[in-house]
Image (cartoon, helix red, strand yellow):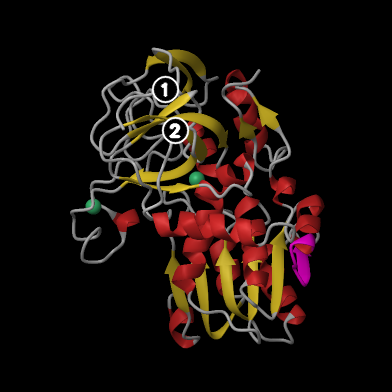
Amino acid sequence: MTTTTVDVPATSRAAVIARFGEPLEIRDLPIPTDLEQGALLVKIEAASVCGSDVHLWNGTLGGSQAMELPVIPGHEMVGSIVRFGEKAEQDSFGEQLRLGDRILFTHASCGKCLQCTLANEPTLCTKRKYYMFTNCEKPPYLVGGFAEYCYVFPESGRVKVPDNVSTPWASAASCALRTVVHSFDRVGRIEPWQTVVIQGSGPLGLFATALAKQSGAGRVVVVGAPDERLKIAQSFGADHILSVEQVSDAADRPAAVRELLAGRGADVVFEFSGARTAFTEGLAMVKDGGRYMVTGQIDRPGQEVPLSPGYITRHQIDVLGTWSGHIAEYWKALQFMSLTKGRYDFDLLVPNRYGLDQVTDALTKMRAQQDIKPIVIPHEH
Ligand SMILES: [Zn+2]
Ligand SMILES: [Zn+2]
């Protein structure tokens, strides 16, 4: 399976960050012809913008991740297979892969370190290679989503996209929804008599609203803004919404949430907002003995918040974190979309399309919250 019947050009256009905060450059990069064993080459059918792409472009992600510019941003994408390396005929679940099949694929964990093997935590791999953080002037060059083609690392998990899941939905599943699924996996069971608070009404918070309802949570409160996103939360099943624009003082929000939940806090609070002060606020929304999952935060200087650790002790709160996702969570995210098709209109999260030369515009709109999740179609426009 090493030959190709698909015409692949010698070079690929790619949107490149050469300097933080400046408009992206469109460059022609070589398309690798000799693929490593286990690698694939895909044509990018769609790549969506994640909040992390905006932080990367701003230069504010550097604290948590070493990188050498230039890089191709984008790590949330769907590719269709155009070239096979040896021994790459199956996805991570044993499904046969063919030319033209749409797949999602993970960052590359080594599969050999203690996190990968003993702990079964590949997102914590000590030798992990990341799309969008990897220099694009060295082979295999095409290591980010905002390009016409992309290299699938031999170590990357990969999963075929079900036929009834649209390409833009699958793209949004490959970081946003799979991260939410990972958070739900780690937080544990949510029972029908339990209450859930979701901080944030961006793509992660809205996916989490749907997942919380589908998982059987008795009551779901979404805390966020603007109103149009809170309306989407309601259409996804939120029982209550709390506008941070209306309750503009963060100190008032825990009491407002508790009032909605019969005076108690929530059994589970998920933080998907990324707001600096969200942690202190969210912790005070958890009921005694409850769980707090922190997923939306960035680890960098300036993000510190005042906290009395004794609050966690006294109220016996489980505080948890989630980073990225395993290939199993990509599979679950796609199955969720496939099996609930018709119940949740995820088109509401991905209303707009951009060409490759409009990536700067897409990032700008995402940053200004003028677009909820821009979809870049590299082969159009
Ligand atoms: Zn992301
Ligand atoms: Zn590893």
Q: State the residue position of label 1.
A: 5
The answer to whether marks 1 and 2 mark residues whose Cβ atoms lie closer than 8 Å is yes
Tag 2: residue type? Leu
Three-letter residue code for mark 1: Thr
Quadrant of residue 68 within the rendered picture:
top left
**Which element type, helix, strand or loop, lies under badge 1?**
loop
Question: Where is 85 relative to 63, above or below?
Answer: above
In the image shown, does 212 or 268 lie closer to the viewer?
212
Work out whether mark 1 precedes mark 2 in sequence or the reverse, and give the earlier one. Answer: 1
Magenta stretch? Answer: 235-243
**Where residue 129 sits: x, y (%)?**
30, 41
Crowd tier of the residue under label 1, counting other residues whose Cα lies within 10 Å: few below 14, some 14–19, many 20 or above: few
Mark 2, secondary structure of its residue:
loop
Q: CA separation, marks 1 and 2?
A: 8 Å
Q: Nearer the viewer, residue 335 or 73?
A: 335
**Would residue 87 be found to the left or right of residue 368 on screen?**
left
Circle 2: is it few (<14), some (14-19), or many (20+) Cα within 10 Å? Answer: some
The quarter of the displayed image where residue 191 is located: bottom right
- The x and y percentages for residue 178 are 50, 55
Percent x, y of residue 90: 35, 46
Q: In the rendered image, which residue does mark 2 sit on?
A: 99
| Quarter containing the C terminus | top right
Q: Is residue 338 left or right of residue 178?
A: right
- Residue 239 counted in the magenta span: yes
Q: Residue at image x 34%, y 55%? A: 123
Is residue 246 left or right of 63 when viewed as pictured?
Answer: right
* Residue 79 in sight from this viewpoint: yes
